[in-house]
Amino acid sequence: MFSVTVRDHVMIAHSFRGAVFGPAQRLHGATYVVDVEFTRAVLDEDGIVVDIGRAGESLRAVLGELNYRNLDDVPEFAGRNTTTEFLARVVFERLVEAIHRGELGEGAGAVEQIRVTLHESHVASASFEGRVASSH
Amino acid sequence: MFSVTVRDHVMIAHSFRGAVFGPAQRLHGATYVVDVEFTRAVLDEDGIVVDIGRAGESLRAVLGELNYRNLDDVPEFAGRNTTTEFLARVVFERLVEAIHRGELGEGAGAVEQIRVTLHESHVASASFEGRVASSH
Amino acid sequence: MFSVTVRDHVMIAHSFRGAVFGPAQRLHGATYVVDVEFTRAVLDEDGIVVDIGRAGESLRAVLGELNYRNLDDVPEFAGRNTTTEFLARVVFERLVEAIHRGELGEGAGAVEQIRVTLHESHVASASFEGRVASSH
Amino acid sequence: MFSVTVRDHVMIAHSFRGAVFGPAQRLHGATYVVDVEFTRAVLDEDGIVVDIGRAGESLRAVLGELNYRNLDDVPEFAGRNTTTEFLARVVFERLVEAIHRGELGEGAGAVEQIRVTLHESHVASASFEGRVASSH
Amino acid sequence: MFSVTVRDHVMIAHSFRGAVFGPAQRLHGATYVVDVEFTRAVLDEDGIVVDIGRAGESLRAVLGELNYRNLDDVPEFAGRNTTTEFLARVVFERLVEAIHRGELGEGAGAVEQIRVTLHESHVASASFEGRVASSH
Amino acid sequence: MFSVTVRDHVMIAHSFRGAVFGPAQRLHGATYVVDVEFTRAVLDEDGIVVDIGRAGESLRAVLGELNYRNLDDVPEFAGRNTTTEFLARVVFERLVEAIHRGELGEGAGAVEQIRVTLHESHVASASFEGRVASSH
C-alpha cells in the first residue's frame, strides 16, 4: 500500500459537557495540528497517490470552515462534544465528500482509505481512520 | 476506527546479553519517550475513546514502576533482555491489566487495541501492538 | 553559560481586537506548548542550574492559572490583546515572582535570565527573554 | 505484533513530468528523512525484531546508492517520476533484497512486513508498506 | 526582548565546488525547513512583534524565488557555493529588504534583529543572525 | 553571525547524590540527543562555518567515549554529579580540544562560540554555551 500525508492546522474555541472532562467543561480552546494520510494500492500514471497540491488545498478548505471559530456556536455540532476524536471524523467525512465532488482530481477516486490525526499538544492526539466508499 | 494517543517518558539503566548487542552489553541506560494509542470502533456517549486524564495517570503509574531503576535488578525481568521491543510489550500488558481492573474507567472496556511505542532516540523506536481481550 | 529548559502546555480561548488580526478577531483558541529556559553562569553545588522538579511544578502552577480559560474574561488582561508574545511575558513575569518567593528553591536565586517560548502551532511561536532582577 | 523503526536521510535532485506537478517539473531537489519499520509476530531469542545495527547499515547502504545524485540521470529510473511514494517503494524493495541476501542477519528472515516513510518536509511525507515474501 | 518565529520550506537542487564537500560536489538537492525569528524590544500597540500573516507571506515570497530551482543556474549565485549557511544569509537579506520596502507593515520597522535557520535534515541546520539597520 | 548545528546521541547509565534528585539518586540512565552549534562571524572561502562531515565525526568521537557506559565508573567524573548541564560542558570542552588539535580542519580555528544542548526527554534539556579561546 502507498500513502501520502499532508499537514495543516486549525485554532478553535469550545467547551465540553460531562464530568469526565473536569476543567475542560469551561470554555477554552486548542490548536490542532492535522495530518491526513491518503492510502491506495497502486500509484496512478504520474506515479502519485493524489495531487498533493489539491490535497493540501482541500484540507485547508475543510479546516477553514472551523478555523478561528467557537465550535459551541456551530449549529451542526449542537448537542455534541467536539472532542479531538470527534473532530478527526468530521475532517475525514468532509474530505471524503471533497473527493466525491472531484475536488482532489479524478485520480483521487482510487483512494481507498484516509486517516486523520489531530495533535492537540506535544503529548496528546486523536485519529479517525476509515474506508473511502467508491463514488461509482 | 477512532484512537487516542498519550505520551510520557521513563529513564532506566540496563545491560544486554548476546554478541548482537556489541557495546550495549555493558551497563548503560536510556530515556524512552512512550506513546500509547488506544483504539476502538465507536466513541462512548461523551464522544471520547478513553478518559484521557485517567489514561495518562495509568501510563504514568505503569512507567513509575520502571522509572529511575536498573532493570538488571528487577526480579521479573531476570534472564531476559529488556530491549525496547520487549519493554513495549511489558507496558502494553500492564495497561491491559489496568483496563481490566477498571482503572481507566468503565468506558475503557470497549478499547479493542493498544499500540505502545518507545522512542529510544531521535533515530530509533520500537512498538508492540495487540488486541485487548474482553474482560467479560 | 549553563541553561536548563522544561516544557509543558496550556489550552485557552481568546479573541483579538484590531484589523491586523483578521479572522482571529473572532473568539477562537490555542494550545501553547511552552518551553522555559533558565540560564546562569555557574552550576550550584549539586551540579544543576535549578531543581528541575520544582521548575516544572512552578511552570505547571503558572500555566494552571490560565489553563482551560477564556482569557477575554480574565480581569488582569482587560483591554489587552493576549497575543502569544504578550503571554510569553506574562509567564516570564510570574516565574520571576515564583523565584523571588523561593518556590524554585534557594539555588534558583542565581538564575540570571529566563526565556519563555510559546509554540502556537507547528509553524509559529513567540518568545520573551529577560533578566531576573536580584531579589536581594 | 512487534516492530522496530530506524531513521536516516538522503539528499537528491530530480524533476517530474506531468502538468500535475506544476513548478516541480523543473529540476529541483529534496531531503528525504527516511523511517523504516520492520514488523514481526514474535521476538527472536535475543529479544529483538532485527539487529538494529545491521538494519541501520543496510538502510544507509540503500540510501547511499541514491545520495547526492540527480535521479534524472539514474538509468534504472528512466521514464519514471521519482516521486516520494515511488521512492518509498524503491527503498522497500532494496531492503527486502538485502534481507534475502542475509545482510540483516539470519533472524531478519522472520520479518513479515516493512513500512518505509519518506518525510520530504515538515508538512508532507509518503509511505510504502508491503509484506516480505519468505525467501525459503 | 520579544520575538516571533514563522516556518516554511523550500526545495532546491545545487552542487558545490571544493574537496571539502566530497560527494556533495555532485548535483544533488535539499529540502530546507526555514524558521525566521523577528526580535524587538517592545510590542506595538496591537501587542505584537510583527503582523504574523504578512511575515509569513514575505517569507513565502522570498522562498518562492528559490523554490523548485537549480541554484547552479541562478545568475546571482554564480561562482558561489550555495551552502545552507550562505542561503540563510540570502533569506535574511531579502527579508530585511522586504521590511524596508514596507511589505511587513509599518510596525515591522521596529524589528531590531532577524535570525534565519535552515534545517536541511533531522540532524543538521545552519543559521544567520543579524541586526536590521534602520531604514530612516 | 553564522552557525551550523549537528545532531547525534549517546546512551548512558548514572546516579546522582543529593536529596534534590529524589528517585534519580538510584542508578538509572538516559538517552541524550545532542545538538552542537558552531558560530563564527564570517564564512570561510568555501562558504561554510565548519566542515560539517568532520564536525559530525568529532562529535561522534566525543560521545563515543561516553556511549554505553555507567558514568559512575568513569574516573574523570568521580565525586561529581553527571547532570545534563554538567555533561553539556564536558562535550563543549572536548570539542574545543578537538578544534585546537586540528581535528575539525584549519578553518574551524575561526569558530568563536559553541553551544551544546543535551535533550534528555521530550520535555527537558540542558545547554552549555561558551567562547572558543583562540589557539594562537
Image (cartoon, coloured by chain):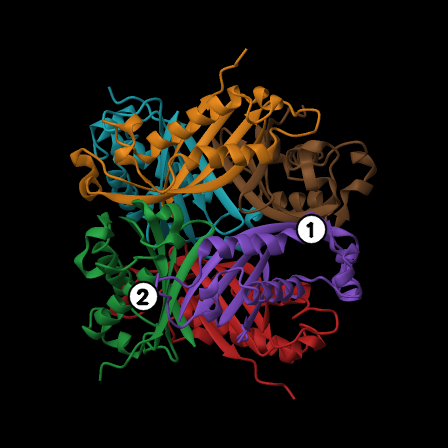
Chain colours: A green, B purple, C orange, D red, E cyan, F brown
Q: Decide: is B94 above or below F24.
A: below
> Which residue is the site of mark 1?
B12
Q: Position of residue E97 (x, y in %)?
A: 27, 32
Q: Position of residue A81 (x, y in %)?
A: 30, 58
Q: Residues within 10 Å of mark 2 (few under 14, many from 20)?
A: many
Asked if residue E26 can be seen in this view, the reply is no
Q: What SS does tag 1 mark? A: strand
Between the residue at mark 1 and the residue at mark 2, the CA separation in whole angstroms equals: 38 Å
- E75, A58: nearer the viewer: A58
Q: Label 1: chain?
A: B
Q: Position of residue D84 (x, y in %)?
A: 41, 66
Q: The C terminus of chain E is located in which quarter?
A: top left
Q: Position of residue E73 (x, y in %)?
A: 35, 51
> Which residue is the site of mark 2?
A89
Please give the count of numbered marks on the rendered protein.
2
Query: Which corner quadrant of the image does residue D59 belong to?
Result: bottom right
